[in-house]
Amino acid sequence: MVVREKTAREKLAVELCGIALETPLIPASGTMAKEALGEVEGVYGAILPKTTTPKERAGNPPPRIAETPAGMVNSIGLQNPGVEKFLEGLDDFDLGVPIFVSVAGDTVDEFAALCERLSGDSRISAVELNLSCPNVEHGGLTFCAGPASVEEVIEACRAAIDKPLFAKLTNEGVVANSLAAEGAGADALTVINTIPALTIDPNTQSVLVRGGLSGPAIKPVALRAVHDVSRAVSIPVIASGGVAGGTDVAEFMLAGATVVQVGTASFVREPEEILREFSDYLERMDTTAGELTGALRGL
Amino acid sequence: MKFHPVKVEAREEIGGYTLLHYRWNGPVEPGQFVMARVAGYPVTFDPFLARPFSFYDHDGETASLLFEVRGRGTALLDDSPDKIEVTAPLGRGFRVNGAGGPVALLGGGIGVAPLKVLSRRLESMSIPYDVFLGFADARYSDVAHEFPGAEVATVDGSSGVRGTVLDAAPDLDRYAAVYACGPNPMLAAVKRAAGENAFCQLSVEERMGCGNGSCNGCVVPVRDGGYVRSCIEGPVFDAEVLAW
């Protein structure tokens, strides 16, 4: 019997909650506009548009972003047109790969209602629950206050939808919250969201942006969280936090991630370059994306 | 976001501003901008983000960016790099309405930057125009020499009339169209001076993260409520659309 060696492209394939993905990269929610889709065709294994909420949200007043060393702090405030308009425009995101939808509500009931609204839509392969936005007045990070609140919202969503559910969690308390999410029926965990942060303008002696830190600056924090969580749970981990190159992707997979999100780095690099670097890494190490997950030596 | 490495052909100082010329033979619309940074990225990721700049000029072969050093990103670009990295031209620029007589171009400080490409477009369409420029002081107003016939105002009165650009442009409502770029308070004042029924287009200056619509960081408030992105829906807006 002749066993054909996998092509470089085939080595990128992974499976997440029964969904076949051509590559292990997906966009982090809120970092890829439909205007930027042309850049990512063939790059992402699935598409994940910006978080949608029950009603339209104007978002926070500017200034919304501030550059920091190797990163940025943002406070966008979930600006979006609301779930109905979002669904009207969802076909714009059809690149022939699975579509995951990120949702956020102010309350448990709103989360459940959003899940119910999406449950019958065959265009949607999975739902990511944004339980960790640091930039909204209600809901947001409070859902990550502890295992009890995580459990409550996931149980309500679980009852409302049959599609795979991902719980996107903040760094603080991530292991306990991950275990609670798993116990309540989450199918995967997205680890981590931006980290609460503050920037100050010394010239005006006032706050510049109070929001969430993202970018390469947070990579080691996210890596630690992914590693800790993947050892604690038996459901897949989706890594998010500071991925900016192909070896970052490899490191997150070694730490236990099944797929890896690219977010802020897509503002300053082409995601295609990151995928190419990761593919080169797989060739160099004579391995595949699927084999890499959790293959970290030691510890 | 895709960045193209380009060779810097020349660096000039014009008063308090820096002008970088680089090879770029693609089309450029008046009012469009690029994200730019020094080459060598992403070795340090610091500064992390590229910076948005209006095209100052473009002749089909070479493009140029006029900027003021404000922070680390612009300081590095000012430090005689051989190569920089730029995106393709971005955003929605000035819409030129050919009907109705002379038009006014107003620039506040570095807001002078997009007016050169716009003036060339107006010349190619045989539309007469007047240029009004406001600066902090005479050091910056040197760039006005690049706009022959421009009326100049400086806040300290060291060049031209004392005051803001609007003090140099007393009768805005007599123009068929008004085009302006500068800080938001200036643009709001131009909008008021142009009058409610004017064809008035304003190019906003906002901090930007990505330049391709993804980060929602560069938004401006609009009249109907909410915010729109200056990198995609702008940076040039019909004045009536803006909330201020």
Image (tube, coloured by chain):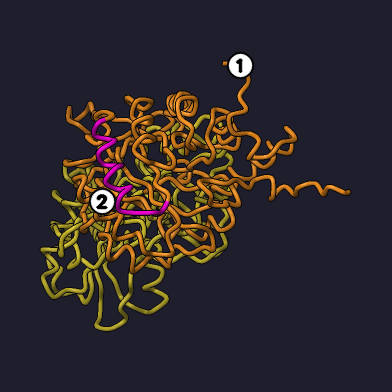
Chain colours: A orange, B yellow
Which of the labelled discs sits on residue B88, or is there none? none
- Whether pointer 2 and pointer 1 mark residues with C-beta atoms closer than 8 Å, the reply is no
- Within 10 Å of disc 1 (Cα), the crowding (few <14, some 14-19, many 20+) is few
Residue B54 seen from this side: no
Secondary structure mainly formed by the magenta segment: helix
Q: Position of residue B40 (x, y in %)?
A: 57, 36
Give the Cα separation between the discs numbered 2 and 1: 41 Å
* Residue under the image location 63 percent in, 48 percent down: A13
Q: Does residue A159 belong to the magenta stretch?
A: yes
User: For the magenta stretch, what is the residue range?
Assistant: A148-163
Q: Quadrant of residue A142?
A: top left
Residue under label 2, please give it.
Answer: A112
Residue under label 1, please give it.
Answer: A298
Amino acid type, mark 2: Ala
Q: Position of residue A207 (x, y in %)?
A: 19, 31
Mark 2 belongs to which subunit? A
